[in-house]
Amino acid sequence: MMTGLDRRKFLQLAAMAAAGVVLPSCGSEETGTRYTNSDIAKLAQQRLDEGLRSGGGPFGPLRFNGYRGLAELPWFELDDNGQLHNVALDLPKAIDMHCHLGMSLLLAPDVDLQKPTGRVIHLLDCDATNPGCELDLDVYINRNFSEQAVDALWWGSAAQGLWGSRSASTQTIPNLLHEMDACGVERASIMPIAFDLPFGDDLTERWIEAIEIAGAQRRLIAGCSVHPQDPARFDKLRRYARAGARIIKFHPTMQRAYPDSDVMMELYNECERQGLIVFFHCGRAGIEPESTHRYAMPRHYEAALKTYPNLQFILGHSGARDVAEALPLAVRYDNVWLDTHGQGVSTLHDMLNQTGGERMLFGTDWPFYHLAASLAKLLIITEGQPDRRFALLRGNAQRLLSLSGASV
Ligand SMILES: [Zn+2]
């Protein structure tokens, strides 16, 4: 019989195999200082610490029953259909700098991105049951999901590679716009990921086109992605920039590339020439295959930040569970912006105090999570500070977008 861990490993391998991700060959890569036992120990310690500290920070315990439970907060209510919506009409209209759409890859039938459906099934769906799963806003967000939920996520990834998934078919443009309206989010930056699959790996083209067909260019900011191993990466990058993409997403974990590798360093040069903002997945989320953890250690990003001071870099999830190592990078380099998605409120509060919040950005990682989960955290940490609230929800994103020459 499979243990929980075996089962998880099996599912991860199945999902990655389905997504065509090539597994690293053992021993073909140096270990040295790229990924150390101390790194492994730090992740284990981070998990222990956040469990012990949850609820003990400046805002006390913040645990809710599902995303719907956020209606207990002063800014949200449930409507007649039981859907969460924002009732604080005086809040700044937010700009979400970390968003995606439903994915279908390889042989999967295309998700009809133009189709409104019933309830959005988020990839980590805290409203699947009634009452929903316990949603603790004071831990890294994926800690809220059971092993079964994370397994379902991996099966979902496999499904996106082969047969299309039920949840992906609800992660459409009209459904996103509806959730944005309900939460007071005006614009969202939509970021595809290039996986380097043999076919069906054209999310950038499909999403740019879908945004145009929906006539949603005013609200959805088109992003792009190229794979560092793609021989056509420079041509594609230029083509995407010409097609109006303003942000490029690199995912060192999924793309299996160190952010300071030669091939990546060359790409940043072209990003700068094309006026693109670089959005990095950064740090270990803790639910990805362990063999990929090494690529996302925050120290591997420093060469890029330092070598390209005029290029603007967003650190996705503020380094996720490696936030303690990512935060000093944002303090040291003023071309570094922090995507606040995922972090718990006590950590966000510390980040705000340490950085002044001038380069902290609202991000949601939709459709993994409901937009309101990330929004609620920023509202909590900026209560009574209207200038900071405006900066985090909107002003900082506007400034970043204007630096890249995009219309704001
Ligand atoms: Zn994301």
Image (spheres, rainbow, N blue to C red):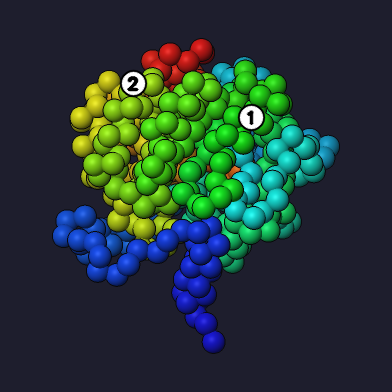
Provide residue 177's location: percent of width, then percent of height.
69, 30
Between residue 21 and residue 57, name the one nearer to us: 21
Per the image, the residue denoted by label 2 is 273
Picture quarter containing residue 282? top left
Residue 289 vertical placement versus 296 (above, below): below
Picture quarter containing residue 249? top left
Q: In this view, does 330 lie to the left or right of 113?
A: left
Q: Is residue 228 left or right of residue 372?
A: left
What residue sits 38% from the left and 21% below the top?
274
Residue 249 disc label: none
What residue sits 40% from the left and 49% below the top?
255
Between residue 176 and residue 340, name the one nearer to us: 176
Say how many tags the image has: 2
Provide residue 218's location: percent of width, then percent of height.
62, 18
State the SS at label 2: helix
State the SS at label 1: helix
Q: In this view, does 35 lie to the left or right of 322?
A: left
What residue sits 30% from the left and 39% below the top?
264
The amino acid on which the numbered mark 2 sits, given as a three-letter code, is Arg
Mark 1 and mark 2 lie on one chain; the one further toward the N terminus is 1
Per the image, the residue denoted by label 1 is 209
- Work out whether residue 178 can be spotted: yes
The local crowd at label 2, few if under 14, some if 14 to 19, many if 20 or more residues have their Cα within 10 Å, is: few
Between residue 332 and residue 392, name the one nearer to us: 332
What residue sits 29% from the left and 28% below the top?
269
**Can you name the residue that lies furthest to the right here?**
80
The local crowd at label 1, few if under 14, some if 14 to 19, many if 20 or more residues have their Cα within 10 Å, is: some
Q: Are marks 1 and 2 in contact (CB under 8 Å)?
A: no
Tell whether circle 1 marks a residue whose Cβ is less than 8 angstroms from ligand 1: no
**Can you name the residue that lies furthest to the left here?**
32
Provide residue 50's location: percent of width, then percent of height.
39, 54
Q: Distance between the residues labelled 1 and 2?
A: 24 Å
